[in-house]
Image (tube, helix red, strand yellow):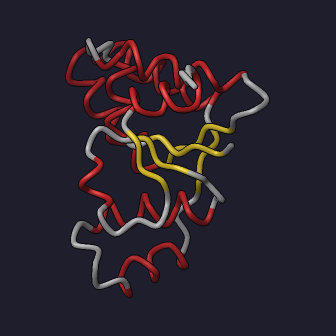
């Protein structure tokens, strides 16, 4: 399964923001699981770096380097930009770029704490707890 992580998931991991960290860290740990491919975009990494640097400028670069060593980076291409511009349903350009980046990488779902940002999505949108409960700890 290919999973795309929105910036807010990366920020919760990089800054250990509880209670979200408990769920998002479990998802981040899937980078070593052969059943999952974990993606993000350069934009999401830039946002995560910004918030990490606000907390601790000395460790921000190291934290981003560590993330990059374990995550697949879905590219933002001319096609990604074109699809975002053409979709009149997309009101937030950044969200459109992330969505089409995930789609073009073949991701099955986007994990975000702001699901309403992807109201135009044909991909499955889950928050970190929903993803864990559905795919990691199913109760059925």
From the viewer's perspective, tell me whether residue 92 is left or right of residue 109.
left
**Image height of 134 relative to 21, above or below:** below
Residue 120: percent from left, percent from top: 34, 69
Residue 95: percent from left, percent from top: 33, 60
Residue 35: percent from left, percent from top: 75, 32
Residue 60: percent from left, percent from top: 37, 21
Can you tell which quarter of the image residue 9 is in? top left
Residue drawn at point x = 46 percent, y = 17 percent: 25
Is residue 98 visible in the rendered image? The answer is yes
Image quarter where the C terminus lies is top right
Residue drawn at point x = 39 percent, y = 26 percent: 129
Image quarter where the N terminus lies is top right
Q: Residue furthest front?
A: 140
From the viewer's perspective, tell me whether residue 79 is left or right of residue 13.
right
Depth check: 53 or 25 in front? Answer: 25
Can you tell which quarter of the image residue 75 is in? bottom right
**Image height of 44 relative to 13, above or below:** below
Can you tell which quarter of the image residue 57 is in? top left
**Image height of 9 relative to 7, above or below:** above
**Image height of 81 relative to 56, above or below:** below
Is residue 66 visible in the rendered image? The answer is no
Residue drawn at point x = 36 percent, y = 36 percent: 127
């Amino acid at each position: 399964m290919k999973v795309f992580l929105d910036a807010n998931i990366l920020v919760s991991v990089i800054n250990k923001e509880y209670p979200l960290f408990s769920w998002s860290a479990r998802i981040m740990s899937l980078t070593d699981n052969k059943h999952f491919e974990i993606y993000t975009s350069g934009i999401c990494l830039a946002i995560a770096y910004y918030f990490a640097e606000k907390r601790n400028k000395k460790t921000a670069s190291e934290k981003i380097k560590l993330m990059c060593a374990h995550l697949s980076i879905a590219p933002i291409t001319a096609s990604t930009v074109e699809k975002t511009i053409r979709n009149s349903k997309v009101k937030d350009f950044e969200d459109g770029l992330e969505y089409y980046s995930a789609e073009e990488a073949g991701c099955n779902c986007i994990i975000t704490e702001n699901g309403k940002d992807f109201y135009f999505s044909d991909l499955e949108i889950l928050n970190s707890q929903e993803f864990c409960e559905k795919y990691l700890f199913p109760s059925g």
